[in-house]
Image: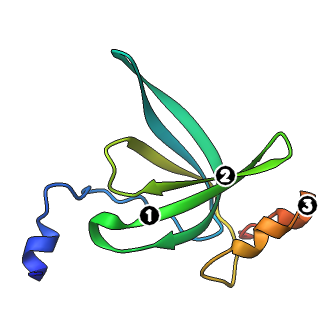
Amino acid sequence: MDALKLISDPCLKENVPEIEIGDTVRVQVKIREGEKERLQAYEGTVIARKGSGISETFTVRRISYGVGIERVFPIHSPNVASVETVRKGKVRRAKLYYLRGRVGKAAKVKGVVG
């Protein structure tokens, strides 16, 4: 694949969200119900980021009613309206899969001080 062709791909978003592993983010997702379209917020911790180019994705984990829910969002999807960083996290790993086995306060990620 030609590098110039990859850069000028019309499907790629111009303003890619600045998200890092461990950040708490609020993702606005477009939901279609019949003819209507609305935005639904999904807030959680970014535990993984994988891929590159058009197929790049990030995984967001949250606890809902005591059950861990993970959703994978393609960064360049037109259904992802916006990604807003709520809180920066301080981590020393590229993937936070170990949070799946933790419950309560142990599943929290430390915040960046300052």
**Label 3 vs 1, first from the N-terminus:** 1
Q: Which mark is residue 49?
A: none
Q: Which mark is residue 44?
A: 2
Between 89 and 104, the one lying in front of the other is 104
Q: Mark 3 and mark 2: span between their CA atoms?
A: 14 Å
Left or right, 55 with reference to 108? left
> Is mark 3 in CB contact (under 8 Å) with mark 2?
no
Q: Quadrant of residue 21?
A: bottom right
Tell me residue 45's x, y (percent): 66, 58
Task: Please give the residue where the numbered disc 1 appears in the rendered image.
Answer: 57
Whether 24 is drawn above or below 95: the answer is above
> Is mark 3 in CB contact (under 8 Å) with mark 1?
no
Q: Quadrant of the C terminus?
A: bottom right
Whether 3 is drawn above or below 9: the answer is below
Answer few, some or many: residues within 10 Å of disc 1's Cα (few below 14, many 20 plus, some between 14 and 19). Answer: some
**Label 3 vs 2, first from the N-terminus:** 2
Left or right, 5 with reference to 26? left
Answer few, some or many: residues within 10 Å of disc 2's Cα (few below 14, many 20 plus, some between 14 and 19). Answer: many
Q: Amino acid at mark 1?
A: Thr
Whether 92 is drawn above or below 114: the answer is below
> Is mark 1 in CB contact (under 8 Å) with mark 2?
no
Q: Amino acid at mark 3?
A: Lys
**Label 1 vs 2, first from the N-terminus:** 2
What element does badge 3 sit on? helix
Image point (13%, 56%), residue name = 10
Task: Please give the residue where the numbered disc 3 appears in the rendered image.
Answer: 105
